[in-house]
Amino acid sequence: LSLCIANSLRAPDPGAATEEKAVESSCEVMEEFVMGDHARLVDSMRLAKELAASSTFFAKLSELFATDPAFRRALERVRGDGGKRLRVVAYGLVGTEYSWVPRFRLAVLLLLRDAFPEAIGTVEVVFPIVVPVERRALEELGCVVSASVQQCRLVHEPTLIFMPYADRVFFENLLILNWSADQLGKIVMLGHSFDTMVNMIDLSMDKQEMFGVTKQREKVRRILAIHKYVREIALCPDFVGLLDNPLLGGGLEPLQESDEDPDEAIEDRCDRSTCKCMHCIAHRERQDMMTALPSHFSVHLFRIDPEIDMECLVPGNCTTRVWSTVNIQMKYDPQFAGWHLNPSEVYIEDKNLTEAESIVKEVHETMIDVRSSSLYTKFIDHMKENPSIRDRISSMLGDNECMELVIYGPGSFEFDVGSQFQLAFILLLKEAKIFPVGDIEIYDPALSPADVKACFDLGIRVLLVNEQCRRSVEKPTLFFVPGLALAANVMETNFYPKQLNKMIIVSYGFKENGKSISHAVENMNYGDAYVGSLAFERNRFMWASMDYIHEVIVMEKFDKKLWALSGLKFEFFEVPDDMDIFIKVPRLTLMEIVLLNFVLDLEYNFLLAFDHVASLRIQLEERISRPFNEDQCDCKDDNPRFWGQVFRHRLPAMNRTTWSPPPKGWIKLNFHGIGCSQDYPACIGGILHNDNGEVLSYYAAPIGEVDQIMASCKALERGLELMVKHHEPVRKLIIEGDNLTVIRWFNGITQPSERVYHSVVHSLWHMALRRLKEAEALAPAKASEECNKGKDKGAGSSDDKKEKDDTNGIDEDGDGSQGTSSKFFIPPGWVPREYISWHVEEAANQVAIGLAYLGPHLRGGSRYLSVEYDCGYRVGMEKDRPDLTWFIY
């Protein structure tokens, strides 16, 4: 990205630069930090206007307004008979305190207003997270500043709308609210090329539909319908030629294309152009989007015949609903005021309401798992017993009764189990009251409608505005930011002693990232700074604050590991109030910072154009199909894959709620356990099916006085014993159960308690290994070779080193990320078995549940039926359920 954009930033013909210009540009101009400094911000805006005045982008734009006769005629039609001036409404100009990109773009709009006063009127900047210093500076420049959180507005007068990003949500909402020939005829759009955005959307939709994700077109149906009625006049990328401007000085060495591929961490095991594994799909999707979405600016006009019935283009248009940035529809109120989604103002489909109920149930079960873990218990004990932490929290609070808790970028709870663990941990923090947490707020563009509803039900407030992780701290705040890039934005925004001292950062630890940052700083001091490093531009703020991290609480210290939580760290700051901490931040040249600002902005544009929820659905569909692909590109050895790391992600709702036969070549075991009650003993039940949906065996039994967890473990163990006894060889096995805790043990997410440890290990042995029969026994040398291979790689080995480190299983140290590869080596006469553990809802496990409920009524204890061995009896089936009448009597 840096190389591509740097070449664009330079003028097309560098040889045309004069010697005098080269001499001028040899002087380095260092950046100045303007955060909170009104005078510096105004000076920066003046320089931005000088840069814009000599830019190629403004030259092309002013030429269009001044000399293009066709455009001028179209502009007259937009302005109407009275020749009203265009009101400029600018969106997406967030962060003038921090970045040259919004400064430059605002400067272009101001120059356009000054150059064509007869056509251009007021410039209004819609700036939801504007801070006082920005408002003051923009108003001094003659702008009207609106802090509205509306996604966009109704248009009642001739308007030039500036939107620099391919923001599909913004454009769809703009069309929803102005879906008439008259209203669209009053709009001129300046910004990112509409044509390239539509091409990218088409490309993305085609990919989604290849994987069965078919309902995403609803989000952009007006964009696709209006495309052919948009007249687009191409200009150029707004940043083109900026690096040759002498106002920026020098200091930027020509960027060389690196030979190092950032994706080398994933071994190149296959042809990425055709491979269907998740890594290759993600790689192709990223490359395709970058190709389809160049940062090209255009002017757009709508050419719609007044006689056209807009309802025919898109039936059922509802101007009372718009899309939020978290993928949910909400009511549109012209007087809308508020920072959070209101549960009574959103529209959620019934299927998402049902899915939200499942998410909430799983989060509550996850809270139980986390609360009972030794890691969490020792963490809480440490917090209670450490007086310095208590004193620090008390000092931070001051006169405040509680602190805010803001979650940025946790991911989707509908798709990712790790996100559920993080959310459960946050809720437990509030419950424990060690940190006096008040409101919990969350934002992630990957939140699905079901995620949003689950947050409502869990008492979490969903932010309506994308703050870009730039919440300015006014009261004690705990930021939960799993991504270091997000933590860097938080740090830059609050880089003052008074604000840093009110913050606690919970992340995977940016202090440890200091070595790599220090190396970058050292290289910069020797003149070798890699200005294309996006990480360094933000990380330098973290590097400058590392010496002031007063207290670090590392979760890993508290004994055994826990999925998605072990690496978390709590970091407190203590900075002297009178210190100018900005002197600690490494400076870049002005040219370097302008380059990096535009590169970061290009990346942000990709994120806005990207449909995160659709992408997650694609990846999930691809993940669940991976074990059943004939050509598994990342499994080329003879050992079967361990699929635990794949199914640490939740199954799609259809797969969780509806039973289906296993794929070809697989056997499926459904199991269920019921804990004892006052009147009945604990019971177990289960059923085995082949890939034709035929019943192989089913079983039921009472097992005495045990709880549901133990009963579920025994149900699985009994089913595996019957499979081994009557149905071997089974080379590929799926186990399905509705007990989330038990399934997570076999996917290596959590560790079983001691009381069920023996049962779990016994089941895991039968799941991961099978004994060779005489007919398929290996020669002695071959058997020895297989045994050695098992010792080295284990039952769940993979060619993929990354996934090998992430293998599942249970070990005595309680490391849930480790499994068969270290504890279950393959002895002679045994071979690996490929298996999958799936968590399903009770609706998809009804037969096993029904069998378990028969347990107390069975005469003489346990019963089982095997089609293969109980000759003379055939299993009667009705709607995929066995005839239980014969089974009982």
Image (cartoon, rainbow, N blue to C red):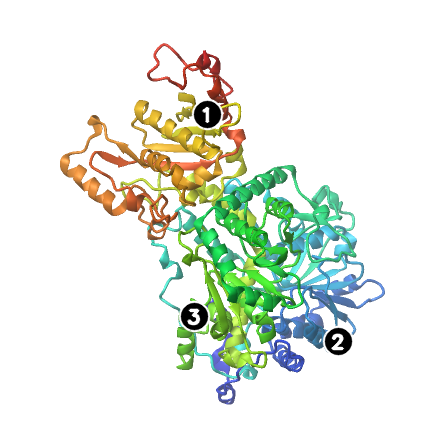
Q: In which quarter of the image is residue 628?
A: top left
Residue at the image point whose x is 26% and y is 42% from the top: 825
Near-viewer residue (253 or 409): 409
Q: Can residue 861 be seen in this view?
A: yes
Near-viewer residue (1 or 642): 642
Tell me which label, 1 or 2, sits earlier in the chain: 2
Residue behind mark 3: 514
The residue carrying pointer 1 sits among few (fewer than 14), some (14 to 19) or many (20 or more) residues within 10 Å by Cα, namely many
Residue at the image point whose x is 74% and y is 55% from the top: 184
Find out whether the residues at labels 1 and 2 contact each other: C-beta distance under 8 Å.
no
Tag 2 secondary structure = loop
**Numbered circle sitting on residue 683:** 1
Tag 3 secondary structure = helix
**Numbered circle sitting on residue 142:** 2
Residue 132 appears left or right of 12: right
Kind of residue indicated by mark 3: Gly
Q: CA separation, marks 1 and 2?
A: 76 Å
Tag 1 secondary structure = strand
Residue 431 drawn at (x, y percent): 58, 51
Q: CA separation, marks 3 and 2?
A: 43 Å
The quarter of the picture where the C terminus appears is: top left
